[in-house]
């Protein structure tokens, strides 16, 4: 009975703790090996002529194993019970209660698993190497603007009025000239002194000076400026300057870590960190004539950061910091940078010709699925819809009609109005383009030769 109960306990223990049960099995097998060893030793007595001892030993061994079994059963039960107790004790020693490690424990300094790889062997995450490589090429720009004072005495050239003032103590002196000062940042993009910045940093400036990181201050001249993209190129007379290489902004992904470098509020060069929050943003803050394809970042950007660098962790320039959205005027984590690919195209054109020429198609488009599109009877959900065709323009000559749905520009999918507008504007005038169009449910290809966009006069942003 006892052996049966212990056998059941052993089976239960085997299911609950296979490791302990395995140890018990090893002990039981060992016991039977010892007993079997005794049966092997017994023939030694027979070889020495001690037949009686051998025969009695064999008889007792058989009786022990095959008799009524009380002794064997008790012994096996004892061994089983001993193995269970030993196994429980071993399990208790090998499996102490689980305790989660705390950072307050001595010797615990594990970094969070979502951190980037440690820098060097220090175990501390740092972007100091990136900053040391790129910061020498980010400079401060000072602009000075002469403000025109109102003419308080417009009739001083009249002799009668001059005589009137002479009788009363002389002609009043004009007020002293007033000048306004601006502050921004810029990025050196060539060793011979070309600097990329924002148009609004130098708009209307009479004098421009740049502070280099080697404590030199140099005069700068404007090579070219492009208000629609808010980009400008300056030139200083210097050589062997540190430069920042332009990266491929099309490869930037939402979530990438970025660093913003500039001179916010004039306190000196400052580095802030964030991520790319979104791509292809259009804010409209520069007016309807602007061309925007911003990278959005939560890296803090403030006044003075305009024209500064937005770099990735590969030490590449991926954007020129340009705007922020804020009800207070300070950073709330919504900043915008002009992507480096757009900046590269504009810069090349400004350096070569001093101005940017943009293509024009001569149509007005609306998003597919919008109310204006539905009003035209268009139910397509992809692409953009032609709402109006300018008479005599390139699109008119190519056969475009209101209600056409444009789905591709030179084979590239068209997904929204802003992207399409930038694609057209970024193509030089006189270039033939191919547009994929849906009309009455049928797809067709229309070819048009772009005209030149004539910029509308814009009020100074200052």
Image (cartoon, rainbow, N blue to C red):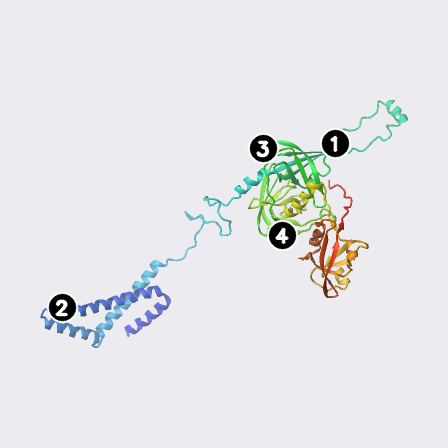
Asked whether the beta carbons under mark 1 and mark 4 sit within 8 Å of each other, the answer is no
Q: Earlier in the sequence, mark 2 or mark 4?
A: 2
Q: Give the vertical position of 126 relative to 404 (above or below).
A: above
Residue at 72% in and 39% down: 203
Considering every residue shown, the one lying at the far bottom of the view is 68
Element on which disc 4 rests: strand
Q: Earlier in the sequence, mark 1 or mark 4?
A: 1
Q: Earlier in the sequence, mark 2 or mark 1?
A: 2
Between 286 and 196, the one lying in front of the other is: 196
Q: CA distance from mark 2 to mark 1?
A: 125 Å
Residue hosting label 4: 278
Residue hosting label 2: 44
Residue at 26% in and 70% down: 77
Q: CA distance from mark 1 to mark 4?
A: 42 Å
Residue hosting label 1: 178
Residue hosting label 3: 214
- Residue 440 at least partly seen: yes
Asked whether the beta carbons under mark 1 and mark 3 sit within 8 Å of each other, the answer is no
Q: Earlier in the sequence, mark 1 or mark 3?
A: 1
Q: Quadrant of residue 382?
A: bottom right
């Amino acid at each position: 009975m006892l052996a049966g109960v212990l056998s059941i306990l052993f089976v239960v223990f085997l299911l609950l703790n296979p490791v302990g049960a395995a140890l018990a099995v090893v002990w039981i097998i060992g016991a039977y090996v010892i007993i079997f060893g005794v049966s092997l030793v017994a023939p030694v007595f027979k070889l020495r002529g001690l037949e009686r001892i051998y025969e009695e030993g064999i008889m007792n061994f058989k009786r022990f194993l095959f008799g009524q079994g009380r002794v064997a059963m008790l012994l096996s039960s004892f061994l089983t019970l001993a193995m269970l107790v030993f196994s429980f004790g071993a399990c208790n020693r090998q499996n102490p209660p689980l305790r989660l490690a705390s950072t307050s424990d001595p010797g615990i300094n594990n970094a969070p698993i979502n951190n980037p790889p440690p820098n060097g062997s220090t175990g501390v995450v740092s972007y100091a190497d990136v900053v040391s490589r790129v910061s020498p090429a980010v400079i401060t720009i000072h602009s000075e603007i002469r403000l025109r004072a109102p003419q308080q005495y417009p009739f001083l050239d009249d002799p009668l009025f001059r005589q009137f003032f002479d009788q009363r103590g002389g002609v009043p002196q004009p007020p002293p000239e007033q000048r306004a000062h601006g502050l921004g940042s810029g990025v050196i993009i060539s060793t011979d002194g070309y600097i990329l910045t924002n148009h609004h940093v130098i708009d209307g400036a009479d004098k421009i000076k740049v502070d280099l990181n080697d404590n030199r201050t140099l005069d700068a001249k404007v090579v070219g400026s492009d208000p629609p993209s808010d980009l400008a190129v300056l030139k200083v007379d210097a050589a062997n300057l540190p430069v920042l290489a332009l990266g491929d902004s099309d490869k930037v992904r939402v979530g990438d870590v970025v660093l913003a470098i500039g001179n916010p509020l004039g306190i000196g060069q400052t580095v802030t960190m964030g991520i790319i929050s979104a791509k292809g943003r259009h804010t409209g803050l520069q007016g309807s004539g602007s061309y925007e394809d911003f990278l959005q970042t939560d890296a803090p950007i403030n006044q003075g950061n305009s024209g500064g660098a937005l770099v990735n962790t590969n030490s590449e320039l991926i954007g020129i910091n340009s705007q922020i959205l804020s009800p207070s005027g300070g950073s709330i984590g919504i900043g915008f940078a002009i992507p480096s690919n757009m900046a590269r195209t504009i810069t090349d054109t400004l350096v070569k010709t001093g101005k940017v020429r943009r293509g024009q198609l001569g149509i007005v488009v609306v998003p597919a699925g919008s109310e204006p599109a539905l009003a035209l009877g268009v139910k397509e959900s992809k692409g953009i819809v032609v709402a109006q065709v300018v008479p005599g323009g390139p699109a008119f000559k190519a056969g475009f009609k209101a209600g056409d749905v444009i789905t591709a520009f030179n084979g590239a999918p068209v997904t929204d109005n802003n992207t399409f507008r930038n694609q057209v504007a970024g193509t030089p005038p006189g270039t033939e383009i191919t547009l994929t169009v849906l009309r009455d449910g049928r797809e067709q290809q229309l070819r048009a030769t772009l005209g030149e966009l004539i910029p509308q006069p814009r009020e100074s942003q200052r």
